[in-house]
Image (cartoon, rainbow, N blue to C red):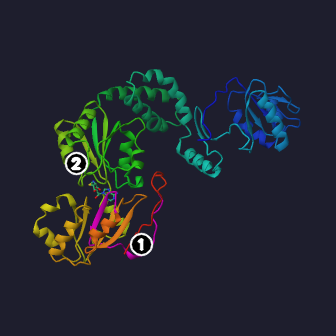
Amino acid sequence: MQHFPIFVALAGRRVVVSGGGEAALAKLRLLLKTEARVTVFAADPHPDLAALAEAGKLTLHRRAMQPGDALCAVLFYAADEDAAQDARTTALARADGALTNIVDNLAQSQFITPAIVDRDPVTVAIGTEGAAPVLARAIKADLEARLPATLGRLARIGKAFRKMAEALPMGRARRDFWRDYYFRTGPRMADAPDSTVEGALDGLLAEHLDRQSRKGHVAFVGAGPGDPELLTLKARRALDEADVVIYDRLVGKGVLELARREAIMVNAGKEGFGPSMPQAQITATIIEHARAGAQVVRLKGGDATIFGRLDEETEAVSDAGIDWHVVPGITAASAAAAAVGQSLTSRGRNDETRFVTGHDMKGFADRDWASLAQPGEVAAVYMGKRAARFIQGRLLMHGAAPDTPVSVIENASRADQRVLACTLADLPQRLDTARLSGPAVLLLGLAPHPALHGTTAPALPQDTHAPAPKPIMELVQ
Ligand code: SAH
C-alpha cells in the first residue's frame, strides 16, 4: 500500500488553493462541501471563482502566492495548470508546513484526492494509487447505483438514535437492528418526513428488543468445490450473517474470505488422513456456540449431504434441541464433470450414475463391481486416489475393458485444477507419476470431451493466492 487512506477533519481548518482556472474550480467544488476555511490565490481568477468569493464561500487573493501564504494550512492544492508555477507554489506551501497536492501530478503529490461516493455523512473513498482511474470510476458508478441516495439522510437520523439503540446489547443484536434500519425499513421510507422515520425507528427498536430472546441456529452449508463463484446465494448470505463459522479442510480460502469479518472462524479439519478435530469435538463446538445464541455456519466442502458426515452432526444438534437447516452446495463430482465437459448421465449410455467413496471400496459387494464393470457405466469416486489400484484390479477382474476411460480431476473448479485423461489399464501408474497433492475425483467411464482440448481454465480473480491457472487438460499420453 503506497497510499494510506485517512479522512481528515477539515471543519474550521485552513485549506489553500493556488490557481484560478478550471482545475482550481474542480477542486473547489469538492472542498466547499466541507467546512474548511478555503483560501485561493489567483492573479486572474475565473468569474465563477470571484462569485464564490463574493458569496463568502472562500477568501480570494488576486495575486500570485508568496512565502508564508500557506502558513497553518493543513492541505494545499497547486492548480496553476502550469508545471513551473505548480512547482514554485508547492515548494512555498511545503515550506509553510502544508501537505501538498499538485493537480494531475501524482508523482509530485504528497496526497491525492480519491474518487468519492458522497452520501454525507457516509463517504466512500476509492483509490487506485493512480494505477487505474478507469477502474476507480467504474467502482464509483457501481457504488453510486447500489447505495440508496437516502443513505446520508438515514445515517443522520440514525446518528441521533444511537443512544436509544444502546438498550440493545452490544454485538449481534445491535448490529441486526441497524442492518434492518439501513437496508430494510429505512430505504422504504425514502420520501417520508424525518419525524415518520424517527417513529419507525422507535417501532423497530421495540421489535428488536422483543426478539432479544432469539435462539441460536445452525446452518449446514455446502461451500462448493472451491471456486467462490460456485457458492449459492443462500450460502453467501449465511456466511454474511454468521457469528461463528466452523469449516472443513476442503473449504477454499476464497470462500472463507466471504465470511463476516467479525465472525469467529474455527478450523475443524486438517489433512484427510492426518490429524483433524475429532467428530465429537466438532459436534460439541457447534452445540456450544449455538447454545450461546450464535448463528453458526457449519461449512463443508462441496455439498454437505455427500460424504460429509452430515447426519451425525444434524442428529446431535437435534438432540440438543437446536434449530438447523441445510443449504445445498455444488458437489465435487459436478465440478469434475464440468471440468471434463461431460454429462454424468446420458440417454442410451447410462441412466444412473454413482457417487462412491474410495475409502469403503474394500467392502464393496461383488455384484457392485460386476455392475460397475459394464460398458457405459459411470461413477464418481471420491477419496479415490489411494484406492485406484484396488479399483482397477476389481473392475478388470469383473470383465471391464482395459481401455475404459477414467478421468482424474484434481482441485476441480480451482485455479490449480488438473485433469488426467487415463484408461483403466494405466490409471495407477498415471496417478503415481502425476503425484497429485490436492483433492481429486475419479470419473470412471468418462474421458474428457475432445472439444475441450487445449482450452484454458478461466482465471479466478477472487483467489489471487492460487498459482496461475494451468491448461485445463494435462493430457500426458
Ligand atoms: N462433501 C464433499 C465431499 C467430501 S469427501 C463434496 O460434496 O464434494 C472429500 C473428497 O471430495 C476428496 O477426497 C475428493 O475426492 C473430493 N473433492 C472435494 N473437493 C474437490 C475438488 N475441488 N476437486 C476434486 N475433488 C474434490
Work out whether 438 lies above or below 25.
Answer: below
What is the span of residues highlighted in magenta in the rendered image?
435-459
Say few, some or many: other residues with alpha carbon within 10 Å of mark 1 (under 14 / 14 to 19 / 20 or more). Answer: some
What type is the residue that disc 1 sits on?
Leu
20 or 157, which is in the foreground? Answer: 20
Residue 175 placement: quadrant: top left
Drawn side of residue 347 relative to residue 338, left or right: left
Q: Residue at x 16, y 38 (%)?
A: 319
Queried whether the magenta region covers residue 36, the answer comes back as no
Q: Nearer the viewer, residue 164 or 312?
A: 312
The residue singled out by tag 1 in the image is 452
Q: State ligand 1's quadrant.
A: bottom left
Task: Identify the residue position indicated by label 2 in the image.
Answer: 310
In the image, what residue occupies the spot 39% across and 28% down? Answer: 171
Q: Main secondary structure of the magenta part?
A: loop
Point out residue 281 in the picture as x, y percentages from the top left corner. 22, 38
Residue 405 x, y percent position in the rendering: 28, 74
For label 2, the SS is helix
Q: Would residue 414 be found to the left or right of residue 430 on screen?
A: right
Q: Is residue 372 visible?
A: no
Residue name at image x 18 percent, y 71 percent = 393
| Residue 200 placement: quadrant | top left
Taking the image as drawn, is residue 137 in sight? yes
| Amino acid found under the numbered disc labelled 2 | Leu
400 is higher (above) or lower (below) than 237: below
Q: Position of residue 45 (x, y in %)?
A: 85, 37
- Between the C-alphas of marks 1 and 2, the distance is 35 Å
